[in-house]
Amino acid sequence: MPLANSADNMHSKVAQSFAIQVKKITNGQLVIKTYPSGSLFKGEQIFGAVKNDLVPIGGRLISALSHEDPLLAVDSIPFLATNYREAFRLYRASKAEIDKVLQGKGVKLLYTMPWPAQGMYSSKKLESVEDLSGLRFRPYSAVTQALGAKLGFTAVDIPAAKLSKALRKKQLDVLFGSALTVTELSLHKRFRYWYELRGWLPKEMVVVNLKQWHSMSVVQRQQVSAVAKKIETIGWVRSKEMAQHSMLRLVDAGLEIRQLNSQLQKKFEAAGELLLQQWLIEVGDRGRYLLEKYTRNLR
């Protein structure tokens, strides 16, 4: 089970718990070994490895797969879902369609777990729209790349495995990410500020190869599904708990937590609205139905 994140990352820890519980519930008939930190396949290779049956199971950021189908970008559209309540309702509204897309690619969704709301690390204080021009950033999905372009940023293509090195060489001026990543990537050594955007809560998912899934017995599929459902609940709770403590990590690391001023906030929100409209054009009726379902659940 290849994983992109480090062994200490909360997503990897939850995946390890999933593996342990699957082994237990199946009395050792199914054994899953996790390979964190991209040690078996790099993050961008994991979905393809599962889809092509090079490995039976793996974890991947959903929105990083928008090139497979633009619908998979739904949880990374800026300011569509900005807290856990909204993020879960968006997930509930989109889960069936996401699983349908994935099964069309030859994989099955087992469970998801969100990152905390995304903010933005910056090496300098941002006070005007002009301050955004040319800032170097690393997009981690098509949506974040499009958002950066609309804000005037300059994209730098850096694989996840080389991000730490790029930070040491000061190749980035800003970085989208949650407060959790400050210690994992030693971001305090490069950035002085963290802007609390509350922009979106992207989700990691664990998927299984569809052929491998159907090769299991009915009982085993039921057992794995039961564990996945339990782990998904645990993962969402764990993520929310970690988010509540993550601000302390920023402060302890010496970063200043800031809010965008009204001018910059309007710039970001306008970019988010443009991306939402662009996404609706790309996805079509599926997207409109999904959003109607989501907004109806918010009432």
Image (tube, helix red, strand yellow):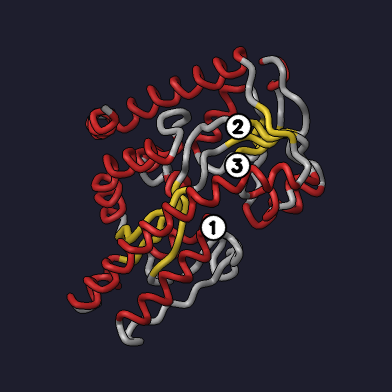
Q: Is there CB contact under 8 Å for labels 3 and 2?
A: no
Rendering quarter of residue 221 = bottom left
Q: Position of residue 14 (x, y in %)?
A: 47, 64
Residue 225 relative to residue 130: left or right = left
Q: Position of residue 236 (x, y in %)?
A: 42, 52
Rendering quarter of residue 17 = bottom left
Question: Tag on residue 196?
Answer: 2
Q: Which residue is mark 1?
A: 43
Dot placed on the residue nearer the N-terminal end, 3 or 2: 3
The image quadrant where one finds the C terminus is top left
Label 1 neighbourhood size at 10 Å, few (<14), some (14-19), many (20+)?
Answer: many
Q: Nearer the viewer, residue 197 or 38?
A: 197
Q: Nearer the viewer, residue 39 or 26?
A: 26
Instruction: Nearest to the eye among marks 3 and 2: give it.
Output: 2
Dot placed on the residue nearer the N-terminal end, 2 or 1: 1
Residue 233 relative to residue 189: left or right = left
Label 2 neighbourhood size at 10 Å, few (<14), some (14-19), many (20+)?
Answer: some
Q: Which residue is mark 3?
A: 177
Q: Is there CB contact under 8 Å for labels 1 and 3?
A: no
Three-letter amino acid code at the position of disc 3: Gly
Q: Residue furthest left?
A: 218
Q: Residue at point 65% right, 57% down?
A: 161
Three-letter amino acid code at the position of disc 1: Gly
Can you say whether 37 is above or below 87 in the image?
below
